[in-house]
Image (spheres, helix red, strand yellow):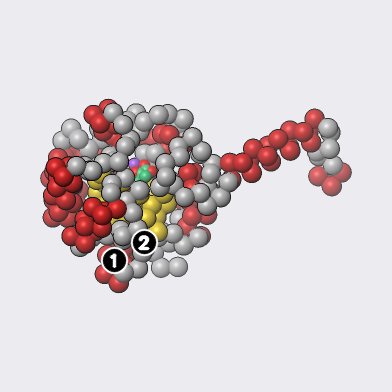
Amino acid sequence: KRKVTTNRLKEMKEAGVPIAALTAYDYSMAELVDAAGVDVILVGDSVSTVMQGLETTVTVTMDHMVYHTTLVRRGVERALVVADLPFMSYQVNSDEALRNAGRMVKEAGAEAVKLEGGRVVADTVRRIVDVGIPVMGHLGLTPQSIHKFGTYQVRAQEEEEAEELKRDAKLLEEAGVFSIVLEKVPAELAAEVTASVSVPVIGIGAGGNCDGQILVSHDMLGICTRFNPRFVRRYANIGEDMRKAFEHYASDVRARSFPDESESY
Ligand code: KIV
Ligand code: NA
């Protein structure tokens, strides 16, 4: 299995081969996603909503992300492992950002980091890329700014915000990102941005004309059903299966039908 690299993702864009990406937060999920041939595994700060039971991503810490990235890395042979830099780990100054990006690579084994924003983070992106750590951008709906926007609604529907997003994508490209995640923006705008930059644009709720797609694994598996926007396609109902299995087990225990002789010593 040849490891997916940032260069390989650029080649895929040039060749018109769509990039498949999913999230993972632990070893066993990462192993399954990797074995399925998914190209990019993101250790997202969505760990907050999926694993920690929280409403926003803003309280996720560097220690949380380092821990989960370490677990994921152990399960991956082929996919590119990208780790989210959590809120306030890269905004104060670029020295701190560099140190935290370094932790993700050195301590956790990430092969790239992702951070949110455009113009504001461009200089920081450049510094991280310059020391040899690939950076993925993230534009459109940026959940770490939830308290500024107040909602998780579709972004860049107005001309002004759309123009700013297009500028930000170019700035990130110039700063050296290897890819950009584009979240919850009109499909037409996403197509325009995708055509305007040389790096692969990975969409989530951004229509079918991006260079690739990403979803939160627990959402597409139906493990987490609380979060249900139209861009999540349900590929399974694992949550339902799990609940049934747990009920079955509990009823077997209560009926003393588990364990039986063959399951005993
Ligand atoms: O944290 C996350 O899972 C993400 C993806 C949804 C892009 O940032
Ligand atoms: Na994220």
Residue visible at 58% across and 46% down in the picture: 237
* Mark nearer the N terminus (2 vs 1): 1
Residue 152 visible, this orientation: yes
Q: Secondary structure at mark 2?
A: strand
User: From mark 2 to mark 1, how far is it between C-alphas?
Assistant: 8 Å
Q: How many marks?
A: 2
Q: Residues within 10 Å of mark 2 (few under 14, many from 20)?
A: many
Query: Mark 2 = which residue?
Result: 19
- Tell me the quarter of the picture where residue 160 sits: top left
**Is 251 left, or right, of 64 in this rendering?**
right
Looking at the image, is 258 positioned above or below residue 137? above
Which numbered circle lies on residue 99?
Answer: none
**Is 111 left, or right, of 161 in this rendering?**
right
Type of amino acid at the residue the image marks with label 2: Ile
- Tell me the quarter of the picture where residue 96 sits: top left
Residue 183 locus on image (x, y percent)? 31, 46
- Tell me the quarter of the picture where residue 251 sits: top right
Which numbered circle lies on residue 13?
Answer: 1
Q: Nearer the viewer, residue 19 or 74?
A: 19
Residue visible at 68% across and 39% down in the picture: 244
Type of amino acid at the residue the image marks with label 1: Lys
Q: Residues within 10 Å of mark 1 (few under 14, many from 20)?
A: some
Q: The C terminus lies in which quarter of the figure?
A: top right
Cβ atoms under marks 2 and 1 closer than 8 Å:
yes
Residue 149 locus on image (x, y percent)? 25, 31
Q: Nearer the viewer, residue 51 or 209?
A: 209
Looking at the image, is 263 positioned above or below residue 212? above
Looking at the image, is 75 positioned above or below residue 37? above
Residue visible at 51% across and 49% down in the picture: 234
Residue visible at 80% across and 38% down in the picture: 258
